[in-house]
Amino acid sequence: MAASQPPNPPSALLARVLEQTELRAKSAIVTAFGDVVLPRGGSTWLGSVIRMLEPLGIGERVVRTAVFRLAQDGTLTASQRGRRSFYALTEIGRSAFERAESRIYASAVSAWSGDWTLVILTGGLSGARRDAVRQDLGWMGFAGLSSGIMARAGSHVTSAERIVREHKASGQAVVLSARADDPDALTPMRSLVADAWPLEDLARDYAAFLSVFGDVRKRLEHTEEPLEPSLALSLRLLLIHGYRRILLKDPDLPVALLPAGWPGTSARTLTSELYKTLAPLSEAAADKLLETEDGPAPPPTPATSLRFRGGDGQESAA
């Protein structure tokens, strides 16, 4: 009599996760380049990208269209060798992922110094340029306290000044550091945070993420069926894709300013544990999948092994 199969083998996990995951081709491709391709030289054959995303239900035609659009908007750059196209993140694309990288792969949340960074937009900054500055600051975790003041907990002056310079708004925006030394100020600050940032929406997103990938961790722990490298790579991509999507909306507020039992803390722990489980096997799949103009892709850089293990590398403690 044949041995009975586990009720939920690893091979069934991918379909379960995909059913509960919002997956857009362009975003998935950026995740794949940042998480897998960038540490292996940064460039790969288009066919490798197609093969990597096919198990996620993203077909060849969709990948080709999405890659073309990412090249058009300056995120990817293309090179040609014979009939083969090779793609890499541009400096803009690389910079965008590297800004997120320090948060995605951080091993822990740093202690908060009590500092705040404020950006005051003067009346001279208006129209599309004002909107663009506010949008880029928003991606960094700043929120509007009023129509002309944006704030983020922590010391992020250098990053804020860079955004202001990039939009040629140095004469119409002022970047300041602030601190509330009164310990009683925490209470009104928590109220300010609750009004300025969409914490309830973020908490729901984190809860959904924990439900999906908590189930993945549980099923991997309770099955004896070996995990195939290709499946490990697919699950790793979905894990980082889902976590990254929430982090792009998360202002990275200090624990002292967050509601008790904040689910983002559990999500960080879960992502770290699952990534460490999936990464070694998934690298074996990437070895076979990724091709460059010079042949097989090089092995990942030593720094890749420090993901979720080293310091968070942020500009300063948030």
Image (cartoon, rainbow, N blue to C red):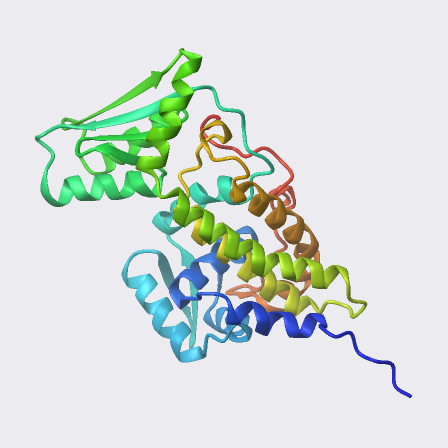
x, y percent for residue 58? 46, 74
**Across the whole image, how many numbered discs are drawn on residues?**
0
Q: Please tell me which residue is depicted at 36% across the width and 38% down the height of the picture.
A: 141
Q: Please tell me which residue is depicted at 37% across the width and 25% down the height of the picture.
A: 189
Q: Nearer the viewer, residue 61 or 265?
A: 265
x, y percent for residue 10? 70, 70
Asked if 11 appears above or below 296 in the picture, the reply is below
Q: Please tell me which residue is depicted at 49% across the width and 76% down the height of the picture.
A: 57
Q: Nearer the viewer, residue 317 or 1?
A: 1
- Name the quadrant of the N terminus: bottom right
* Image position of 110 (left or right of 214): left
Q: Please tell me which residue is depicted at 44% across the width and 78% down the height of the picture.
A: 60
> Is residue 240 shown to the viewer in this render?
no
* Image position of 130 (left or right of 296): left
Asked if 111 appears above or below 47 in the picture, the reply is above
> Is residue 294 shown to the viewer in this render?
yes
Asked if 257 appears above or below 20 in the picture, the reply is above
